[in-house]
Amino acid sequence: MSRTLLSSVAAAAVLASAHGAAAQTEIQWWHAMGGKLGEAVNAMTDEFNKSQKDYKVVPVYKGSYSDTLTAVIAAFRAKQAPDIVQVFEVGTATMMAAKGAVYPVYQLMADENEPFDPKAFIGPVYGYYSTTDGKLLSMPFNSSTPVFYWNKELFKKAGLDPEKPPKTWPEVGEYAKKLVDSGAKCGLTAEWQTWILLENYGAWHNLPFATKQNGFGGLDTQLVFNDQPRIKLINMLADWTKDKRFVYGGREGKPTGLMTAGDCGMELASSGTASTLFAALKPENVGIAMMPYSPDVIAKPQNSIIGGATLWTLRGRPKAEYKGVAKFLSYVSSPAVAAKWHQDTGYVPITLAAAKLTEDSGFYKTHPGRDIAVKELTLNPPTENSKGLRLGNFVQIRDVEDQELEAVWSGKKDAKAALDEAVKRGNELLRKFEAANE
């Protein structure tokens, strides 16, 4: 073959490649999944990209949930927003109030003629992210709820039965003391302290976090989490900090480092933390059970509330991209993909079909405890106190809660003073949100 002919063939190949690349529509997806979860996101996206040739989804890690929400708000204002953004549940009211920014998933799917059944999602997930008339606004993705983890090796060392976790808060205190007495550096820690110790503690014990159905009933809601049961809980944990029965490990997911390092014997954390703990401690050494409850507050637990995040579609992108967005969201929520995501990560199966597929496969028999999250969410029909929270400026309110709880752990305030101040400051933020969205 002549050099001229070789050059022509090579040039044609380059042009063909360029034409193929140009024909593929790129879709930007900003997310907040790092570490093992980020690897799972990349794997899922790669599989979608390989499954068809028209679209290429590009996942971009933007940091923590708060960082991601802040970044997308700034990007939208600059007209540089992605097609899809992952937003944690406390950002729901903020996204709903962002007039003109959000392309509701029910409307997107209808416009793109993509098959979509909102009732396919499990009740707690569907209810949290829907309008009052039942229209789903964002695509459920990594839904979670807090569960109780324990290190079976440390339990054995402390003379505790590694297959029997504590069920009540008084029992947690007893177990924590035995763990510390046996040499553990920490008895108990807790991820996302505001979500678990204040918000979910309320739902689990059928206590209101705020008026107006925890914000679902209107913007003129008031925070009321400075009640006696939560004051008692926080004071008790503050007392436990003195002898390491409870150790505060930082905000959001940072406390899990105490578990993965083998320092802590017990942790309250997201069901989505399972993959991280399994990787560090081995699955056979990690137990998963329901959250403890306070028997002096309630005879039996009510139900837990949802956490995690959903995928929101944003307006302002080229029209050609939305067909690909709709197809990707269908892919994410398809039974096999949703079931694999649940099994790989520990997040809740978002659809009834994914839950059934997992159950039928025998997964829960070979992976004890992985069904706990769904059992907690569906333990009882939700009440006005336990169906979730929908509050404006919620990200900032959680910052206030974190600050006040940190003042308790450092000994600067008692629980009542801290929670009273958190409610006062939080209500000021609610009034600002209300005024801005009247």
Image: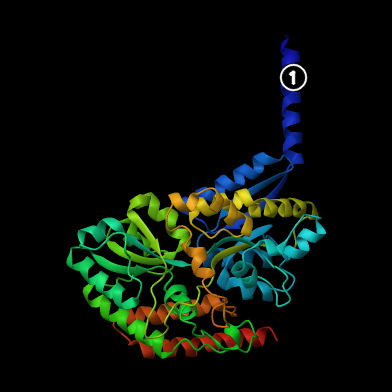
Which residue is nearer to you in this view: 288 or 242? 288
Q: Quadrant of the C terminus?
A: bottom right
Task: From the top left corner, tell me how far across and down residue 146 is, in percent.
Answer: 45, 68
Left or right of residue 414, residue 421 in this image: right
Q: Is residue 37 visible?
A: no
Q: Is residue 203 above or below residue 66?
A: below
Residue occupying the point 54% across, 86% down: 210
301 to the left or right of 255: right
Total tally of numbered discs in the picture: 1
Between 44 and 334, the one nearer to me in the picture: 334
Quadrant hosting residue 387: bottom right
Name above or below for residue 398 compared with residue 108: below
Residue 11 is left or right of residue 278, and the answer is right
Q: Residues within 10 Å of mark 1 (few under 14, many from 20)?
A: few
Q: Which residue is mark 1?
A: 9
Secondary element under disc 1, as helix, strand or loop, is helix
Amino acid carrying label 1: it is Val
Depth check: 146 or 43 in front? 146
